[in-house]
Image: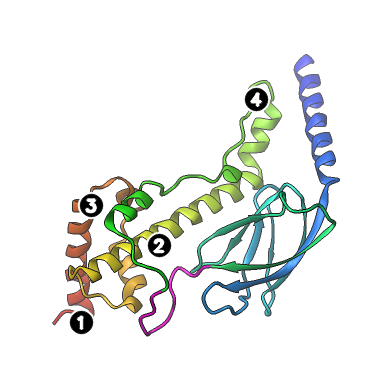
Amino acid sequence: MRIAVSISILFLLFITTNLFAQNDTVRIKGSISDTYTRRTVSGISIINPKSSFTVATDSKGYFETTINRSDTLFLFLPGYRTTKFSVADSIKKGEYVLHLSIEPLSTGLSQGVVIKAAKTLEQIEADRKKIGLTPKELERPDIVITSPISALYEMFSGHAQEREKLKGQMKEDERRRIFKELLNYYNDNGLIDLPEQNYEEFIDFCNLPADFLKYSTDYEITKTIVTQYNKFGRQSGLIK
């Protein structure tokens, strides 16, 4: 009986806390554009992992939604780097009009375009070691052992599922971005001769997991990628 009463009280406290949090809601609307082309992008998911609510940009790259002021939202679209934003530190008002940008994982251009200086092997290694680091907004909250209802809620809720989905996507974004930085480095140093338009296909061909890039040595990674490049080149006709 006491356990049932404790669970009921904890459940009521959970609901009450959420109701108080929902009082501080704001309206956000605006557009999202490609970082490089400056064109608005349709079909971008604006995900709120805290509430498991998602809204997408329309055909003109426009969106509207209501959130709690403290919420952090994530922009997600395959082919682009998953990005987060928040209005928590902005001047308090009831509505915000935002013009956001999202960075493509590839320029998508047939001509070589230098967007920023190529990274050194040391800089790429520093990035490799950070693969899989979880943004604090997606960290699993501490579960109080004395609250079984909270434990069950966290385990099966859409919130937890949404966080895991975003964490996985951000890790995959980083894997592909760092892989491309390595390919740029190998191309510049004459280890391979792979056109940029073949990067995505080659990354899929290698299918190297994120943990391999994170924990292997530069020698192991270089040897593996160059070996895979030779196989890929012969199969695709890039190497005669």
- 85 sits left or right of 133 in the view: right
Figure quadrant of residue 114? bottom left
Figure quadrant of residue 14? top right
Look at discs 4 and 2 and give the one toward the viewer.
2
Range of the magenta residues? 103-114
Q: Dot 4: what SS?
A: loop
Q: Which mark is residue 218?
A: 3
Q: Dot 3: what SS?
A: helix
Look at discs 2 and 1 and give the one toward the viewer.
2
Q: Which residue is mark 1?
A: 237
Q: CA distance from mark 2 to mark 3?
A: 16 Å
Q: CA distance from mark 3 to mark 4?
A: 42 Å
Q: Which mark is residue 144?
A: 4
Amino acid residing under circle 2: Arg
- 173 sits left or right of 192 in the view: right
Q: Residue at x 17, y 68 (%)?
A: 191
In the rendered image, which quarter contains the N terminus? top right
Q: CA distance from mark 1 to mark 3?
A: 27 Å
Provide residue 138's location: percent of width, then percent of height: 58, 45
Provide residue 137's location: percent of width, then percent of height: 61, 45
